[in-house]
Image: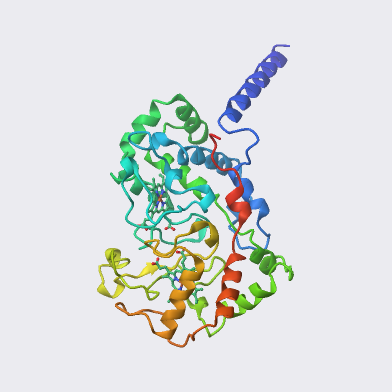
Amino acid sequence: MRNSYTYLRLFAVGILLSILNSCSQNPGQPHPADRVHSIPEAYPLPDSLRNPNGFERDRMTLGQKLFFDKRLSADGSISCASCHKARYAFGDSSSFSRGMAGYATRRNTPPLFNLFRQIRFFRDGGVARLSEVALSPMNEAHELNLPIDTLVRRLRTLPEYVREFDKIYNRLPDPFTITQALMGYQLSLLSASSRYDQYRYQSDSTALSPAALRGMRLFFSDATHCRSCHTGPDFTDGLFHRNGLTDAGRPDTGRARISMSWGDYARFRTPSLRNLSFSAPYMHDGRFNTIPEVLEHYNRMYQKMEPITLQSDLPQIGRELSVEELRDLSAFLEHLNDSIFVNTPADPTQ
Ligand code: HEC
Ligand code: HEC
């Protein structure tokens, strides 16, 4: 008798806990881990993201809450999501984002997706681990301006966070658990549900328009050599190159800032070409507003009309493309847009 009473009590506590638990996430909003369901089985993904366990799922929800929480900035005015906006593929629509008190960032905010495959972070590869990236905007006076030790003290005064860190990590918020939770959420930002992915990973030969098919052949051909840097499942080799930009206006040492080698001056990490229609403007300083402008840049480089102040890594064998070919190339790039990715509700407070 006593035993069954105890069970009943445990059961009631269980229900109460699960109600409390579901309060931390907006009901009706998809769980971040569920993004994976729209991604073709054949797209290469680590097992922990294809089938995340309960711990991973909880960590993602907590990281999501932190990512969107403006209490992560000194004056409570901005969050990670103020610069990494879901509708712009977790990038920004202006060349330079605004941090605390309206200060502009020094580089264009990169979109965030498929970060599990990335081996170095920032456009110059200055940070080697995803978990450590968050420390940088926290420390930066022009961004969140709330160093991690101050943030730890702040989160420890907020019962909702104390409860959730305790549930998931069995300890108080600290630098390790905060950065791990943020990393967990960012790893859930998976994007591979484009028309190209249907074509490539689901063998749907009708998913690309005739123009996009012609553009794809050009992209992978010796006429353009785009594939020599934009390669692999996410269209990047993860390495640092000069793609023929002049350093007019705002000189940026690029990779040389990290490697201390002048040979790396103004080399930047090859960006992915997924979701371009959402993540304009382009390049490390957002100097181009449209895809046709970018393609024109490459075309001028291939014609060698651009006044070259920096020796580029572009292959010398590319040829000038016709207006029709440029249009086809644009059509191909547009088929790399994943509208499911940008339209999935992401802000847990809305
Ligand atoms: C004020 C705007 C701003 C805020 C706030 C901000 N970021 Fe960023 N983020 C940037 C910019 C700009 C870069 C590129 C820096 C560079 O390349 O030097 C960047 C880079 C990154 C990268 C590397 C992406 C890549 O492709 O290399 C990650 C990951 C990231 N931020 C996550 C976060 C997280 C997590 C937060 C919150 C803790 C955050 N950011 C807050 C502007 C911002
Ligand atoms: C030598 C390596 C290399 C080759 C070849 C190359 N790219 Fe790039 N591409 C880059 C690098 C590096 C950047 C980023 C430069 C920066 O951040 O300033 C870039 C940027 C871009 C961007 C802007 C993406 C963004 O998010 O800002 C597009 C679009 C693009 N390339 C398309 C192409 C196409 C199409 C071709 C073939 C015509 C091509 N690239 C050939 C290295 C290359």
Q: Residue 32: x, y in percent?
A: 58, 44
Total number of numbered labels? 0
What is the residue that sits farthest to the front in this orientation? 323
Question: Going 62% across and 65% down the picture, which residue do you hit?
Answer: 335
Q: What residue sits 69% from the left and 70% below the top?
A: 209
Residue 211: name its quadrant: bottom right
Ligand 2 quarter of the rendering? bottom left
Q: Is residue 204 left or right of residue 280?
A: right
Quadrant location of the C terminus?
top right
User: Camera-side residue: 277 or 175?
Assistant: 277
71 shown above or below 82: above
- Residue 237 in view: no
- Residue 105 drawn at (x, y percent): 33, 52
91 vs 221: above or below = above
Q: Is residue 36 visible?
A: yes
Query: Is 303 situated left or right of 12 in this image?
Result: left
Q: Position of residue 269 (x, y in %)?
A: 40, 66
Q: Is residue 23 above or below residue 33?
A: above
Residue at the image point whose x is 46% and y is 88% from the top: 317
Please name the residue shown 55% across and 70% down the image: 232
